Amino acid sequence: MNVVFIDGNSLTLQEVVNVARKNYEVRLSDEAAERVKKARSYVDNLVDEGKVVYGITTGFGKFSDVVISKDEAKELQRNLIISHACGVGKHFHEDIVRAIMLLRANALAKGFSGIRLETLNTLIDMINKRVHPAIPEKGSLGASGDLAPLSHMVLVLIGEGEAYYDGKLMTGKEAMEKSGIRPVELTSKEGLALINGTQVLTSVGALTTYDAINLAKLADISASLTMEALNGITDAYDLRVHEVRPYTGQINTAKNFLSILEGSERTTRQGEIRVQDAYTLRCLPQIHGASKDAIQYVLDKVNIEINAVTDNPLIFADDEYAISGGNFHGQPMALAFDFLGIAIAELANVSERRIERLVNPQLSGLPAFLTEKGGLHSGFMIAQYAAAALVSENKVLAHPASVDSIPSSANQEDHVSMGTIAARTAREIYKNASGVIAIELMAAAQAIDFETSEKKLGKGTKAAYDKIREVIDMLHEDRVMYQDINKSIALTKDNSIVEAVEEAVGKLY
């Protein structure tokens, strides 16, 4: 059985993906369970003693100065969840919902939130039995945590709201009954502990970061195919060039191109056909490498956040102290995910310019729009239009969400991060970029097919070309192109091209 143990400290992005997309089972470590129980005991003492602590014996936000009695504690927590479940729009995809539940459970496992162990175990049971709350995508400010979307998660935990079970949308109560999980009656601090955090924005952004790492590799592969089609000059990838400007992403990208193109008889050296290539070929280590460095920066932040405590107040049971702070504020991730969106958008931007070079006979020396009978057939003419449209949309989406803030809760929460919007936007940019690179893969393979001299492709480009041709035939006459584009996009999603190339040349950076 595939299992991920959570302790609040050691979760990895790969483990998040394994739970979110491969349905790995989740279990709580024994050490974490003891920490959870210890923090809970301290919360119970605070309630019994009637001490005034935010969110435990007071209201929330602007109502933090309203004291709540012990008898009202359960009602307070339930009211918190049902009133805060104000999400709007389509539901998050299943993999994101599973990641949300996992990250929330992992944060609670650190033992600074004061939740009961049985409540945490119920959330873990929901992951393992695949009860997936219906969580709307929109409605979070990304400060005070992801209050609205996480409330939709907790609705199902208490037998309310809606959930997907066995692929069907039903009431939360029905989903819990069918799965054999008993809903929870929340008590003091628990509602706040479950919804005051950054797990929605982090889940969306973390999965997008994982996908962006693979997309960056695929961009190197698609560019290498274009290099083959256009007899690109490989001298620009000489490691001596990049070692004197030692950015990690730049150096690693140059290494990727040299590995992928190794053994090619179609690429050239400077002066053989022309002295230098256009920037979209010659400067690829600098362009792709910059995006990779940006993605690595985001990954570093993701690795911190998926093992962080982001609710409020925090319970320091060893010190017998509860502190109301601001770890729920999404600014560290908002800035990172805005950066992620820009980095991904640039991969698509330069890819579209390579597509233009492939389809434009004045730049490529190939038949116009890569069709044998131009005029009667349009070939890849409108495929380039589609790529241009996706790139243009990304330029709009890449405007940073984190530069905006609208005060909330009667100005008690007077600066918010909009981090969830940043993460969701980065994901949309990723989807568009995948479409652009998918079109380049098709166009480059088509261009290569016009070469009649039987010159060999490089080790990596041959593996990629073969993978494309397994599902998409050369275009001899016009056909319904969106079907081919969808097939190519599917190849970008299943990562099969990257896997085939890495099998041929070794691990890519």
Image (cartoon, rainbow, N blue to C red):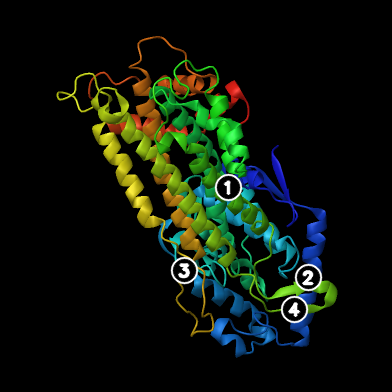
The crowd level at tag 4 (other Cα within 10 Å; few <14, some 14-19, many 20+) is many
Name the residue rendered at 35%, 15% in the picture: 451
Asked whether the residues under the numbered discs 4 and 2 touch, taking CB atoms below 8 Å apart as contact, a structural biologist would say no
Q: Is residue 150 left or right of residue 182?
A: left
Characterize the local packing of mark 2: few (<14), some (14-19) or many (20 or more) Cα atoms within 10 angstroms: many
Q: Quadrant of residue 66?
A: bottom right
Lower position in the chain sequence, tag 1 or tag 3: 1
Q: Which residue is mark 1?
A: 293
Residue at left offset 57%, top offset 73%: 144
Circles 1 and 3: CB atoms closer than 8 Å: no
Identify the residue under disc 4. Answer: 322
Which residue has dot 3 on it? 403
| Residue 387 spot, x, y in % from top left | 33, 40
Which of the pair 390/49 is nearer the observer? Answer: 390
Task: Give the side of residue 484 with respect to residue 336, left or right.
Answer: left
* Secondary structure type for disc 2: helix
Q: Name the front one of labels 4 and 2.
A: 4
CA–CA distance between discs 1 and 4? 39 Å
Circles 3 and 4, Cβ within 8 Å, touching? The answer is no
Q: Nearer the viewer, residue 289 or 445?
A: 289
Residue 106 point in image, percent of width and height: 69, 57
Q: Check disc 1 and report its element: helix, strand or loop.
A: helix
Say if 122 sits above or below 366 in the image. below
Relative height, residue 288 to residue 221 (above, below): below
Q: Does the rendering let one see residue 472?
A: no
Q: Amino acid at mark 1?
A: Asp
